[in-house]
């Protein structure tokens, strides 16, 4: 995956995230597009670059959220690395497997942020387990849709671009 | 180290990134007391370890202190024991001194009450006869000793001066066969005449058989004979029996140990009452 592609995706993701929250309301923070982008990148980039890309995305999210810089900057590299390992080891390709992976990592992200907030004594409203689940579900569903929508689109139009060539 | 870095390059970078984020967070966040959150976080992690270490070290320190205290107490115990021993010794000495002071006070009181001058004397010899109990002392007429001066020591009555020379005096002991002393018993206040028997015991004569005299009673001089001042301890009743139909036979053991006499006090009457003088002349 090229840097340019990542940058394009990033440029798309940031306004999408902001608009999504604006349209749906701020209570719908279950959809974390920057997290999904990070995990998506983790499917294709491995090693040290992944860590720094995840770090950058995390810091961007922190900057956008108006909160403290470092919360997502801390969690995103971990999640990216876990995602990379699981994806490469388990050869995840099925929808439900992808969903489960994203669901778990979203859940893990929420837990890491909660833990860091607790350790640093940051005054946040700690989410309940139910909210963790909602976030995981939202992210999982959205990721599966976004991940596989191009494939479906390409199949229907008989296109074979790059990696998504199913033959 | 280089190999380790190469082997775990990814992990190193991840840790570096995470640490960077932690530092970043701690730099941003301040608590209400302006304490760095990083410090707070570190404290949160470190405090239990610190508490555990503190607890352990405190326990060790307490144990050590207890041991040292115990050792100190042990030393203190032995010092205290030694001190107690010394104090007990001192107490015995004090008792002796107190007794001695009491004796001297009694003698002083005696001197003030009866207007007697005291002349201490040391025993120089003992009379040769076994029937006549006499001793010689180193004070005579040159020291103001007169005939019929009572002689006492710290235990009680010794006797009376019967002969004086310029430098010595002969003292008739209370146990002498010729000795007669007007006495009174301590409890029943029974009066009588104490006579020597020539041995270590004395007898009280002319006590009515109806009188109650008990064994163990103290016997004092009564002062009725105008020779001996009253209330000088003479001896203790050791036996009471019926002598005949009229009088009791009372045996008295002297309080003074005549066998171990060393020093005595001769009582010199400063002003002789005419009645006494007549009596003394009669005795002569």
Image (cartoon, rainbow, N blue to C red):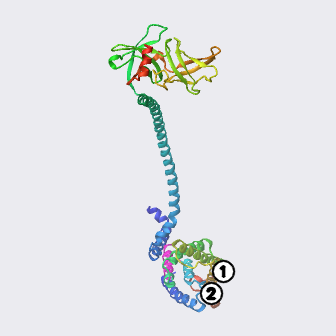
2 or 1: tag closer to the N-terminus: 1
Q: Circle 2: is it few (<14), some (14-19), or many (20+) Cα within 10 Å?
A: few
Q: x%, y% of residue B157?
A: 47, 21
Secondary structure beneath dot 1 equals helix
B146 relative to B206 in the view: left or right: left
- Mark 1: give few (<14), some (14-19) or many (20+) Cα within 10 Å: some
Q: Which residue is mark 2?
A: A149
Looking at the rendered image, the quarter that the C terminus of chain B falls into is top left
Residue A95 numbered mark, or none? 1
Pinpoint residue A153: horizontal percent, then vertical percent. Answer: 63, 89
Q: Give percent across and percent down for residue B142.
A: 32, 17
Of all residues shown, which one is farthest toward the top?
Answer: B129
Q: Residue furthest bottom?
A: A23
Residue furthest out toward the right: A96
Q: Are marks 2 and 1 in contact (CB under 8 Å)?
A: no
- Relative to the observer, which residue lies in front, A32 or B10? A32
Which chain contains the residue that carries disc 2?
A
- Quadrant of image for the N terminus of chain B: bottom left
Q: Main secondary structure of the magenta part?
A: helix
Which contiguous range is marked in magenta? Answer: A45-60
Q: Nearer the viewer, residue A75 or A1?
A: A75
The relative height of residue A163 versus residue B143 in the rendered view (above or below) is below
Report in which chain the residue with disc 1 lies. Answer: A
Q: CA distance from mark 2 to mark 1?
A: 11 Å
In screen coordinates, is B265 left or right of B77? left
B103 drawn magenta? no
Residue sitting at x 53%, y 73%: A116
Residue plotted at (46% across, 19% down): B158
């Amino acid at each position: 995956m090229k840097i340019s592609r990542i940058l394009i995706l990033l440029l798309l993701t940031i306004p999408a995230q902001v608009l999504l929250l604006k349209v749906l309301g701020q209570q719908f923070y279950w959809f974390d597009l920057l997290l999904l982008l990070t995990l998506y990148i983790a499917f294709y980039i491995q090693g040290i670059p992944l860590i720094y890309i995840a770090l950058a995305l995390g810091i961007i999210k922190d900057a956008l959220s108006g909160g403290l810089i470092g919360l997502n900057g801390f969690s995103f590299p971990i999640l990216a690395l876990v995602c990379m390992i699981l994806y490469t080891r388990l050869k995840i390709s099925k929808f439900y497997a992808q969903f489960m992976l994203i669901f778990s990592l979203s859940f893990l992200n929420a837990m890491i942020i909660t833990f860091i907030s607790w350790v640093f004594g940051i005054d946040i409203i700690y989410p309940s387990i139910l909210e963790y689940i909602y976030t995981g579900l939202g992210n999982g569903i959205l990721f599966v849709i976004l991940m596989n929508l191009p494939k479906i689109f390409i199949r229907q139009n008989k296109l074979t671009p790059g990696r998504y060539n199913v033959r | 180290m280089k190999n380790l870095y190469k082997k775990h390059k990814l992990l190193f970078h991840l840790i570096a990134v995470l640490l960077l984020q932690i530092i970043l967070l701690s730099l941003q966040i301040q608590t209400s007391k302006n304490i760095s959150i990083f410090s707070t976080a570190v404290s949160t992690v470190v405090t239990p370890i610190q508490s555990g270490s503190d607890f352990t070290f405190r326990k060790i320190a307490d144990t050590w202190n207890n041991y040292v205290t115990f050792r100190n107490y042990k030393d203190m115990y032995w010092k205290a024991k030694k001190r107690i021993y010394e104090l007990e010794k001192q107490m015995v000495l004090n008792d002796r001194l107190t007794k001695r002071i009491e004796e001297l006070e009694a003698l002083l009181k005696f001197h003030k009450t009866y207007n007697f001058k005291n002349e201490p004397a040391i025993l120089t010899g003992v009379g040769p006869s076994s029937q006549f109990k006499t001793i010689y002392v180193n004070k005579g007429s040159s020291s103001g000793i007169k005939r019929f001066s009572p002689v006492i020591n710290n235990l009680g009555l010794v006797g009376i001066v019967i002969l004086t020379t310029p430098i010595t005096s002969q003292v008739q002991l209370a146990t002498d066969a010729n000795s007669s002393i007007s006495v009174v018993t301590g409890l029943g206040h029974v009066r009588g005449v104490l006579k020597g028997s020539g041995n270590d015991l004395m007898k009280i004569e002319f006590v009515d058989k109806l009188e109650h005299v008990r064994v163990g009673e103290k016997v004092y001089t009564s002062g009725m004979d105008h020779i001996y001042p009253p209330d000088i301890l003479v001896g203790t009743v050791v036996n009471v029996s019926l002598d005949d139909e009229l009088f009791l036979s009372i045996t008295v053991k002297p309080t003074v140990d005549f066998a171990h006499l060393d020093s005595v006090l001769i009582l010199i009457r400063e002003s002789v009452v005419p009645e006494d003088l007549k009596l003394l002349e009669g005795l002569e």
